[in-house]
Amino acid sequence: MVNLETRKLGKSPVEVTTLGLGTVPLAGFRTTASYRDFEDVVDASFKGGIRHFDCAPMYGFGKAEYYLGHALRELGIRKDVVVSTKVGRVLKPAGRVKQQETVYGIDWVDPLPFLDTYDYTYDGIMRSFEDSQQRLALDYIDVLLVHDLGKAWHGDAAGIYWGQLRASGYKALDELRRTGAVSAIGLGVNETESVLEVAREFDIDCSLIAGRYTLLNHEPLEAAFAELQERNVSVIAGGVFNSGILASGTKGRDLTYDYQAVPEGVIKRVLAIEEVGERYGVDLTSAAIEFVGMHPAVASVVLGAQTVGQIQSNLAAASRTAPKAFWDELKHMKLLPESAPTGA
């Protein structure tokens, strides 16, 4: 068992472990996953010290929530963990709605028989929250995140959904937190811009930001993370492997970067990081996890896993630390900016 530190999410009473489990891989991402697989991974994560489990209606169109809630009850660990899920989508029977087309669209393997429709209004958020409670079979949800708000996901249609949130969605979020139905409110997105925009308009506690701060992406260092710290908005970092390349390395199969083919320039950068790692005995996976977790704005790093072996490997990787000389050399080679926090 890894001795994981816990950190508060903003001004909320919620504390999360510095590692969390993301359930995308267990909901049918590129391969099938049975309920038994799901429960085994949750069990192994809990035994390894993880106390934060993240899901969403989108993941397997309800499957992640349905399986997670059941696993927590079967294992008898609900009172010992933090559960986060998301709003902004309402699931409807697959035969009655058209499948959405988005930049990051995912073809789930063997999902539940539903499709997602976007709705960031008061009614939509309340409906989504109540549906999630029923799928999870939980009377309360610790952290509620507005899912995929902004241009990175919606493109030209983003203004429509911003309008819905501003007109009545904020009211729903405020009501859910104020009445104790949830303990922390935030966003779950693939960009930092939308987090800043919401934080300037509405009091959020945290944001799950996927793939925007990694060994390969450093844009939040320019100003975003500093502003979020000033506003006491905690970052939950997802996608720290950029969908695969920072987990498998350059020698892996079917390499992806942000769910697409890996650009040649990215391959060269990863290869250079690997070469420095070889000189210092640092593996790429460990470096990817440690780098993100060292930023003071980051409360937790959420990692996905499809098997017990994968979660055990992630826990082992997270327990290793790189020497200062490794990080110094990456900065000297301009592979990391000088402003990146890399420990003492």
Image: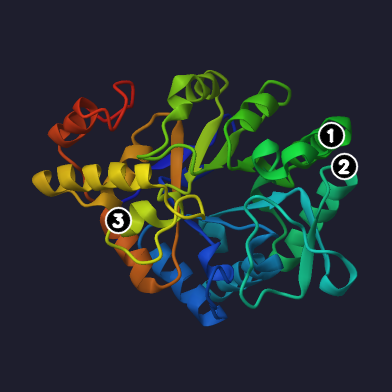
Q: Measured along the vertical axis of the image, is residue 166 above or below residue 273?
A: above
* Cα separation between marks 2 and 1: 7 Å
Mark 3 secondary-structure assignment: loop
- Point out residue 323 in the picture as x, y percentages from the top left corner: 15, 38
Q: Are marks 2 and 1 in contact (CB under 8 Å)?
A: yes
Q: Which residue is mark 3?
A: 249
Mark 2 secondary-structure assignment: helix
Q: Measured along the vertical axis of the image, is residue 270 above or below residue 329?
A: below
Residue for point 56% across, 59% down: 79
Quarter of the image with the N terminus is: bottom left
Amino acid of disc 1:
Lys
Amino acid of disc 2:
Tyr
Mark 1 secondary-structure assignment: helix
- Point out residue 52 in the picture as x, y percentages from the top left corner: 50, 53
Residue for point 83% across, 39% down: 172
> Which label sits in the foreground, 1 or 3?
3
Which circle marks residue 171 in the picture?
Answer: 1
Q: Which residue is mark 2?
A: 122
